[in-house]
Amino acid sequence: MIQIEHIDKSFAEKTVLRDVSLEIPEGQTLAIIGRSGSGKSVLMKHIIGLLKPDRGRVLVDGIDINEISYRELRQVRRQFGVLFQGGALFDSMNTFENVAFPLRTFTNDTDAEIRKEVEHCLDVVNLSGVGPKKPSELSGGMKKRVALARAISLRPRYIIYDEPTSGLDPETSNTINDLIKNLADQLNVTSIVISHDMHSVLKIADRAAFLHAMRIHWVGTIAEMHRSDDAKLRAFVKANEYAIGESALPSTARASS
Amino acid sequence: MPSLQLRLTKPFFSLGQYVLLLTKAFTSLGEFGLYRRNLFIQMVRVGIDSLPIVVMAAAFSGAVTTVQTAYQMTSPLIPRSTIGAIVVPSMIMELGAVITGFILAGRVGARIAAELGTMRVTEQIDALEAMGLNSVGYLIVPRVLAGVLMFPVLYVTATFVGIGAGLLVAEFSGLVPIGEFVQGARNYFQPFDPFFGLIKSLVFGFVITSISCYMGYFTEGGAEGVGRSTTQAAVMSCVYLLIADLGLAILLL
Ligand SMILES: Nc1ncnc2c1ncn2[C@@H]1O[C@H](COP(=O)(O)OP(=O)(O)OP(=O)(O)O)[C@@H](O)[C@H]1O
Ligand SMILES: [Mg+2]
């Protein structure tokens, strides 16, 4: 269970988040949507304590992560898998080593076990065989998928995905959506998905939070989103529909807009 | 233009940040097992990879010092062996360490800052933190330790090579025969001199790597920021190396 309570965040003079509260219950998938620059990535960094709020609290399993020691914070972080927006692959290591890194660092697995696990993770993201390649030799979408494989290699309880499908072709996007959904359903992972891809939001999320003008402008279940007549939310969803050229919302919802 | 107050407090802020960073790094030594592999890689980069350029610079400075010292000894009253008595202690006490230091500041310092700076701006440091690693310990401890361990090795090499080159130049250009050169060096040899050089080299190794780590770790602002940190790392390493050089001389001599 993750609770974000009334956080404010500013950089120098620029306010990014103002009185933002969110709750992500165990086993659920929350999508955070919002326009570019609305503060989605900033919000996500607060959840693992990479940024500290100017005001407010972040609770993970009831523990205020900004009140505990660094050592304890690191224990909390080990329950998380994080896919950064840019992948954040270690460019001094090849693909295999990137995915193996958390396993080598935090488990006592043998080399054979690690090799097997890494191959499995790469297979899951459709990238078997790229192990020896360096991150600089991979395409943007491949990097993202390697980063995803790395994020899930330790089977974390919580996974944060910052735009998991941006820059991917529709088919690969679907594979990734299925993977995120499977992890949530089968392993009961609590997930936070940042995305502007409404297609994938509708497919994988239980609830969505719409970040707009520094606040959570709207939050609710996917079913509620279909029925919502909030103008800003509808505009955002509609723009997306246009962008993907396909209906993001079921026809009933579209008809009513 | 930053306010006066900001400009006056900035150096203290930086010093505080630097001390905190090193404290955070070295209080995580308990997890040394995680850093061991990195330490080995860094030792190779600092030590072995710098060897050719250090050897070359040391050879030239030893040779040039010898030639110039001979040039200045015009009085027939001064024995030729004095050349050895000047060149050898200069190499041992000052040139060996300082030349190695300048080379490492440019080579190793810039590299460390560029590496850590890039890791910062591409969120690789965030990724390490997000996994629950102490990124400061993981990245900085091996680099600083490698500097402190390898710098003395380079210093000793540089000193021997510099003296050797001086000897050869003295002999082959007919300035002073090897025998006299060595005799002069022997007469004025002080057992403390090599220790002084070694202490210097330890301090320089620490100064260069820790300052460069600091510059790289706190990089801000994309590729431009990495460029800035890299230059700053090389420049600041040299500046503090010179300050440390003078400080040690006053303190220990
Ligand atoms: N370290 C920082 N220093 C200063 N400003 C920052 C910093 N990080 C983010 N910002 C600012 O905060 C705002 C929100 O950034 P953020 O990266 O969270 O956007 P986002 O919603 O993730 O956008 P996108 O969808 O394009 O990734 C931006 O205006 C950005 O300029
Ligand atoms: Mg973002």
Image: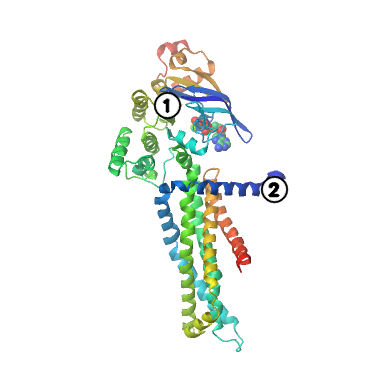
Report if residue A26 is visible in the image: yes
Q: What is the three-letter code of the residue carrying label 1?
A: Ser
Find numbered disc 1 in the image and state the secondary structure of the residue it sits on. strand
The front one of B23 and A111 is B23
Q: Is mark 2 within 8 Å of ligand 1?
A: no
Secondary structure beneath dot 2 equals helix
Q: Give how far across and how far down residue B147 sits, in percent.
A: 48, 57
Location of mark 1 (residue): A191
Image point (46%, 76%), residue name: B164
| Mark 2 neighbour class, 10 Å CA radius: few under 14, some 14 to 19, many 20 or more | few
Whether labels 2 and 1 belong to a single chain: the reply is: no
Picture quarter containing residue A144? top left
- Residue at horizontal 51 percent and vertical 13 percent from the top: A229
Please determine whether, in this image, residue A212 is positioned above or below residue B138.
above
Q: Chain of mark 1?
A: A
Residue extending farthest right? B4
Q: Nearer the viewer, residue B249 or B72?
A: B249
The residue nearer to you, when weighing A80 against B112, is: A80
Q: Position of residue B91 (x, y in %)?
A: 53, 72
What whole-number distance in Å separates the C-alpha atoms at marks 2 and 1? Answer: 46 Å
**In the figure, is residue A128 to the left or right of A74?**
left
Identified by mark 2, the residue type is: Leu
Label number found at residue B8: 2
Q: What is the x, y in percent for residue B239?
A: 60, 59
Please tell me how many numbered marks the rendered image carries: 2
Viewer-side residue, B55 vs B81: B81
Circle 2 chain = B
Crowd rating for badge 1 (residues with CA inside 10 Å; few <14, some 14–19, many 20+): many
Q: Which mark is residue B103?
A: none
**Which residue reaches farthest front?**
B30
Q: Is residue A84 visible?
A: no
